[in-house]
């Protein structure tokens, strides 16, 4: 995978914290930031799936009723 060099601007305090955390983890700052982004994206996906699950848990009845309304009734029919 190729790498792209970017020039980001952050507060001095954030730059110092990022540098210190990267050093603590034995990583370059670039690798540390990449790890944070991957963790954030993975977490975002999981939060989205969790939200979809909660939505379906709360509203499944509505979908079931709509599906039942589309099914032909199983009673006697006039010929």
Image (spheres, rainbow, N blue to C red):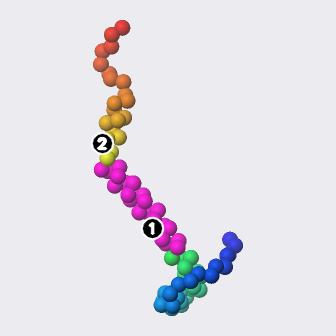
Residue pointed to by mark 1: 43
Residue bounds of the magenta highlight: 37-58
- The count of marks equals 2
Q: Is residue 7 above or below residue 73?
A: below
Quadrant placement of the C terminus: top left
The chief SS type of the magenta part is helix
Q: Which mark is residue 61?
A: 2
Give the side of residue 6 with respect to residue 56, left or right: right
Tell me which residue sits at (33%, 13%) in the image: 77
- Badge 2 crowding class, 10 Å Cα cut-off, few under 14, some 14 to 19, many 20 or more, is few
Residue farthest toward the right in the current orientation of the protein: 2
Give the side of residue 13 with respect to residue 66, left or right: right
Quadrant placement of the N terminus: bottom right
- In percent of width and height, residue 12 lies at 51, 91
Task: Look at the numbered disc 1 and give the secondary structure of its residue.
Answer: helix
Cα distance in 3D space between marks 1 and 2? 29 Å
Name the quadrant containing residue 74.
top left
Q: Are marks 1 and 2 in contact (CB under 8 Å)?
A: no
Task: Look at the numbered disc 2 and give the secondary structure of its residue.
Answer: helix
- In percent of width and height, residue 55 lies at 35, 52
- In percent of width and height, residue 38 lies at 53, 71
Tell me which residue sits at (59%, 81%) in the image: 8
Give the side of residue 78 with respect to residue 22, left or right: left
Tell me which residue sits at (37%, 29%) in the image: 70
Q: Which mark is residue 55?
A: none
| Closer to the camera in the image, 20 or 25 | 20
Q: Is residue 31 above or below residue 24?
A: above
Say if the magenta span includes residue 66: no
Give the side of residue 31 with respect to residue 24, left or right: right
Q: Is residue 35 above or below residue 51?
A: below
């Amino acid at each position: 995978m190729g790498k792209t060099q970017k020039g980001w601007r952050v507060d001095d305090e954030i730059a110092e914290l990022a540098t210190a955390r990267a050093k603590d983890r034995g990583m370059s700052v670039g690798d540390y930031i990449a790890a944070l982004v991957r963790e954030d994206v993975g977490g975002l996906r999981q939060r989205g799936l969790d939200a979809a699950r909660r939505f379906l848990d709360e509203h499944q009845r509505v979908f079931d009723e709509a599906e039942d309304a589309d099914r032909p009734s199983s009673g006697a029919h006039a010929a």
